[in-house]
């Protein structure tokens, strides 16, 4: 082996010392980078929980079920949900139900002979024949077997007995038998089907579609009266060719195929009875389940107050499967795709700044990195497809984020931090979950309540958390609070 010169031998220890010094400087530099929050990006996740299904106005159907189970009569149920109402009777007028529009053709038949009429012209069609109506050049053309007719006005089909059977499905995706008559009219160059049906017959296709016929009798009676009032009020207020949609834009209606002897009995037992206010049928809004409390109409929707549509406690709504729901987990990207321009910058939180009489969202702040916008609760529900506006968005963040690919030298430190909206209770901790060997382990991290001033004079309260660690090896982390958790991040530790 060659001998080193004396000067070369002296330089070796110096070089090793320089290496140790360089490693120390590198570790210190890494530590400085690690603890600088400004250098790290933040990543957020959302956990959504809520209560109830529907708009929350008027009668909770599952709540009515519970009240009936506990001995309330149908009038007591209706008085509970519609404040200050009385009762009155109405007749059995004809209701005009829009079954479907935008059609190029309408097809129907009947097990018995049926008629077609338009103005002063009418004709009989043999039982079992399919009649097809089209519209072109300002004329209605009807073809039934070997026969055909041309009419300048709308056409009406009526059975000689029994019911007409639709072959063209409705907006409820229902075909089959419907009571009353079917009128086919031109609407903007396409055809519309309208079912003209007596009110009490109409209810036979509504009540079993809205609630199960197996429910307690008094809840079925309450549903019949509410549906009757809703339909009669719509009939009195209608100004066009029809009164009601056949789907949930008004009330779900599916014709004879859904009729049931139990709901028929409830309709018959309450024939003509409607909840009323000032000697007129009420706008008897109803919905699936409330979560425990209904809401004032002017707070649930952006509209005027109605004396009988006020928030009330709903003591037996817990029978409903959606009395509570969640947690649902969403990324900021998923929520932003639905919220669109309401998000400024990157989404950080969706925060309730105004509540109703219940905890439903009346006004929500959409908090982004570049500013805040506001949405009414009903608009937020539509955009995000929520079950109801009784909803909490719990957002948790972590920094540095996974995309930072944060790395430190062994023995150096890293600061993990974030915030949770809405704020936790004073003194409440979050959990830091760590995984370095395939097993997740948790430890408590203290939080500090803070306030963020928003545009328009609103304030959002959140809890901040931070912890500095010196992991001995590469470790994954996330923060958790109840069912909510932040995204997972990883700190790589180099030897």
Image (cartoon, rainbow, N blue to C red):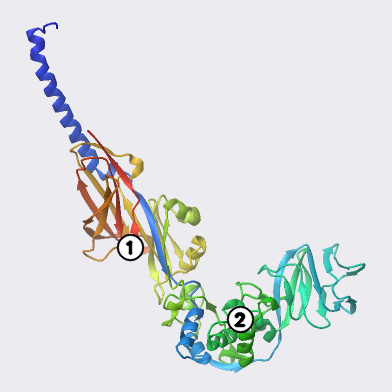
Tag 1, which secondary structure? Answer: loop
Q: Residues within 10 Å of mark 1 (few under 14, many from 20)?
A: many
Task: Name the residue carrying label 2.
Answer: 207
- Of tags 2 and 1, the one toward the viewer is 2
Give above or below for 98 relative to 398: below
Residue 294's spot in the image, x, y percent? 45, 78
Residue 111 in which image quadrant: bottom right
Q: Is residue 255 visible?
A: no
Tag 2, which secondary structure? Answer: helix
Question: Is the C terminus in the top left, top right, bottom left or bottom right quadrant?
Answer: top left
Q: Residue at x 45, y 78 (%)?
A: 319
> Is residue 246 or residue 362 the one in the foreground?
246
The numbered mark at residue 217 is none
Give above or below for 315 relative to 6: below
Give above or below for 397 relative to 129: above
Residue 103 in which image quadrant: bottom right
Residue 276 in which image quadrant: bottom right
Task: Name the residue carrying label 1.
Answer: 422
Residue 339's spot in the image, x, y percent? 48, 56
> Is residue 138 or residue 439 the one in the foreground?
439
Measured Cα–Cα span from mark 2 to mark 1: 41 Å
Left or right, 146 with respect to 195, comes to: right
Left or right, 348 with respect to 299, comes to: left
Left or right, 481 with respect to 277, comes to: left
Question: Is the N terminus in the top left, top right, bottom left or bottom right quadrant?
Answer: top left
Q: Is residue 123 visible?
A: yes
Decide which of tag 2 and tag 1 comes sooner along the chain. Answer: 2
Looking at the image, which residue sits at the far right?
146
Residue 491's spot in the image, x, y percent? 28, 41
Q: Residue at x 52, y 91 (%)?
A: 75
């Amino acid at each position: 082996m060659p001998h080193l010169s004396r000067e070369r031998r002296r330089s070796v220890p110096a070089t090793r010392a320089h290496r140790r010094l360089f490693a120390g400087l590198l570790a210190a530099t890494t530590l400085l980078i690690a603890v600088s929050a400004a250098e790290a990006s933040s990543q957020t996740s959302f956990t959504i929980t809520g209560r109830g299904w529907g708009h929350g106005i008027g009668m909770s159907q599952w709540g009515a079920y519970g009240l009936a189970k506990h001995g309330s009569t149908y009038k007591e149920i209706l008085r509970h949900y519609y404040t200050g109402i009385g009762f009155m009777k109405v007749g059995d007028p004809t209701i005009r139900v829009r079954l479907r529009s935008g059609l190029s053709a309408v097809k129907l038949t009947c097990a018995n002979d049926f008629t077609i009429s338009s103005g002063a012209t009418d004709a009989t069609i043999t039982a079992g024949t399919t009649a097809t109506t089209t519209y072109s050049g300002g004329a209605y053309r009807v073809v039934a077997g070997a026969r055909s007719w041309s009419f300048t006005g709308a056409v009406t089909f009526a059975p000689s007995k029994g019911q007409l059977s639709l072959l063209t499905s409705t907006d409820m995706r229902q075909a089959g038998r419907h009571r009353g008559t079917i009128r086919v009219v031109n609407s903007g160059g396409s055809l519309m089907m309208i079912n003209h049906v007596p009110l009490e017959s109409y209810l036979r296709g509504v009540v079993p579609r809205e609630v199960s016929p197996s429910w307690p009798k008094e809840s079925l009676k309450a549903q019949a009266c509410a549906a009757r009032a809703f339909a009669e009020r719509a009939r009195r207020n209608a100004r066009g060719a029809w009164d009601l949609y056949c789907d949930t834009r008004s009330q779900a209606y599916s014709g004879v195929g859904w009729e049931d002897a139990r709901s028929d009995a409830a309709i018959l037992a309450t024939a003509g009875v409607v909840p009323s206010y000032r000697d007129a049928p009420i706008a008897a809004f109803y919905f699936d389940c409330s979560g425990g409390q209904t809401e004032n109409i002017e707070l649930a929707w952006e509209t005027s107050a109605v004396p009988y549509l006020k928030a009330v406690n709903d003591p037996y709504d817990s029978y409903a499967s959606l009395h509570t729901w969640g947690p649902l987990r969403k990324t900021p990207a998923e929520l932003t795709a639905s919220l669109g321009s309401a998000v400024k910058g990157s989404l950080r939180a969706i925060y309730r700044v105004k509540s109703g009489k219940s905890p439903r969202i009346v006004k929500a702040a959409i908090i982004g990195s570049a500013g805040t916008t506001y949405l009414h609760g009903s608009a937020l529900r539509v955009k995000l497809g929520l079950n109801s506006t009784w909803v909490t968005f719990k957002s948790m963040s972590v920094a540095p984020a996974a995309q930072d690919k944060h790395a430190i030298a062994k023995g150096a430190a890293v600061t993990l931090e974030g915030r949770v909206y809405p704020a936790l209770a004073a003194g409440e901790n979050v959990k830091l979950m760590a995984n370095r060997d395939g097993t997740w382990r948790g430890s408590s991290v203290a939080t500090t309540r803070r306030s963020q001033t928003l545009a328009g004079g609103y304030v959002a309260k959140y809890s901040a958390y931070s912890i500095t660690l010196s992991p001995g090896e590469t470790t994954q982390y996330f923060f958790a609070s109840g069912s909510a958790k932040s995204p997972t991040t990883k700190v790589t530790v180099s030897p």
